Structure formats: structure tokens, C-alpha cells
Amino acid sequence: MTRIILIRHGQTAWNKVERIRGQVDIALDETGLVQAAATARRVAEDWQPSAVVCSPLRRAVQTAEVIARQVGQDVRPEPGLLDINFGQWQGLSPAEVEDRWPEMAHAWLTAPHTVQFPGGESLDRVQQRSMTALHALLERHRGEELVAVGHTVVNRVVMCAVLGLDNSHHWRIGQQTCAINVFRWHEGVFYVDALNDTCHLRGLT
């Protein structure tokens, strides 16, 4: 059995003001750093990861570095966990997107699996590359526990795949900043133990 502890990065300024991030390289804000520290303590208390991997983007790397220090591991960037490329939407607010691409904005909220972002990716493409990376990690770390730090879209499409759902269910997967998801891989089958767990963040400001 191999266990994956899949974590979303901590809060950034663009999470707080709802600006579309995608592959824009934004750092954690003060709250995000506090969230990362609380998450690191939780991971160290509950698991013994043999490796910590993350998206190459700074907000994920910063979160992973805090966790890795707590559990005595190094951080290895994993390109397959890179956030979705929102193309021309990146850096815009939801209101700006709705004003410029009203039909696509509506489709993103109601049928996300049908959307190909202008100059960017689709959910299916993100799921393909993230699951390819995940299966390589599962092969490399057989019988171990592994921490992977990603992003809300990446984590949602991964959890859809793990649960046997297509990407039309994207919005039905909750994924708060520094949420923990836990699943196991055993004899070719995924088993989910936790989804969008944020109990370690209670009481944080």
C-alpha cells in the first residue's frame, strides 16, 4: 500500500481578492505561511513521509518547504503538478472574465469539463499530466507515504480521477487553501481516507 497526502498550497494575496492565478508565480501571504506551518505540524503528527514533492510554482514550493523541514525531507519540484494554464484569463478577476467571455465564463461554472481556456489548457489536459506524474510517483515510492503539494484545480482533477469521476464533477470537490486529502493505492485500486480536511487550520487568523 502506498499513501499519498495531497495538499493544496497556502493562501496568497490573489486568493484573498479572487484573482485568477493559474501559472502566475505568486508567493504566500502572511496567512498562507501560518497555514503552511500548521499543516506541517499536522503532517508530522500523523504521517512519516519519505518524500515531499510539489508544483514548481512559488506558492506550492513555499508550502512544501515548510512541511519538508518539519518531517526531515527535501523538496522535489514535480512539473506534472503545475497549476492549470488559464491563458488569457490569468491575472483577471472573475468579473473581468465574465465581462469579456460571458459564454465561456458561464460554461466554466456549469460545465467545466467543456472549457478550453483561450491560450491555455483544459481540465482533461491537466488531469492527464497530473495523473501521469502521480502514477510515476506511486511506482517510485511503493509501500511508502508521500506528500504532494498542488493547487485547487490540480487537486480537484486528481481527486476526481481517484474517485472514478469525470471532470464534470470538478466543482463538487471542495479544496480550501492548505486542505489535506489522503488516499491509498493498493493493488491497482485507489481508496480515499480524507478530502478537503482543514481541521488543522481551526483558530488561525
Image (spheres, grey):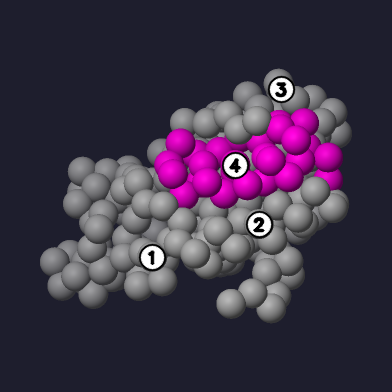
> Can you tell which quarter of the image residue 48 is in?
top right
Residue at (76%, 51%) from the top-left corner?
43
Amino acid type of the residue that numbered disc 2 sits on in the rendered structure: Ala
Could you tell me how far apart the alpha carbons at marks 3 and 1 are, in whole angstroms? 36 Å
Tell which of 197 and 59 is nearer to you.
Answer: 59
Q: Secondary structure at mark 4?
A: helix
Other-residue count near label 2 (Cα within 10 Å), few / some / many at <14 / 14–19 / ≥20: many
Rendered location of residue 42, percent (x, y):
77, 57
Tag 3 or tag 2, which sits nearer the N-term? 2
Q: x, y percentage for residue 34? A: 60, 63
For mark 3, give the secondary structure: helix
Q: Which of marks 4 and 2 precedes in the sequence?
A: 2
Q: Is residue 195 above or below residue 44?
A: below
Give the magenta-colored segment's residue range.
Answer: 47-73
Which amino acid type is shown beneath numbered disc 4? Glu
- Residue linked to disc 2: 37
**Which residue is pictured at 76% across the width and 55% down the height?**
41
The residue wearing badge 4 is: 65
Give the residue type that dot 1 points to: Ala
